[in-house]
Amino acid sequence: MDVLYDCIRSEEKKYCCTCKWYAEFEGVCCNGDSEHRGDFRNLDDTCDCWENIEEKDRCNGCFGAANNDCHICPKNGLEV
């Protein structure tokens, strides 16, 4: 499964898995402006409300989700 994630992420397309509002662990759209908010979405789904994840929000552990389970995320006050 990691190979699929890496493959999709390496492409510069507006997929849910590269969207700022995609909760990857849950597989749900969290964008309040999207018609798909609260819906389960596939990694390669798209929508018009897609927003790029800014580099400063990226993390190698939780990919910007900043959940408390991520021990390397700077958003949780820990250094990468």
Image (tube, helix red, strand yellow):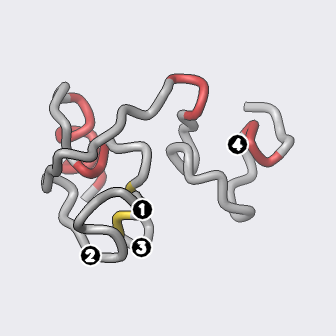
Residue holding disc 1: 32
- Whether tag 2 and tag 1 are in contact, CB under 8 A, the answer is no
Q: Secondary structure at mark 4?
A: loop
Cα–Cα gap, marks 4 and 2: 25 Å
Residue holding disc 3: 26
Residue type, numbered disc 1: Gly
Residue holding disc 4: 73
Residue type, numbered disc 2: Phe
Which residue occupies 86% across, 42% down?
77
Cα–Cα gap, marks 4 and 3: 18 Å
Q: Secondary structure at mark 3?
A: loop
1 vs 3, front mark: 1
1 vs 4, front mark: 1
Cα–Cα gap, marks 2 and 3: 8 Å
Residue 23 location, quadrant: bottom left
2 vs 1, front mark: 1
Residue holding disc 2: 40
Mark nearer the N terminus (1 vs 3)? 3
Q: Is residue 73 left or right of residue 47?
A: right
2 vs 3, front mark: 2
- Whether tag 4 and tag 3 are in contact, CB under 8 A, the answer is no
Q: Residues within 10 Å of mark 1 (few under 14, many from 20)?
A: few
Mark nearer the N terminus (1 vs 4)? 1
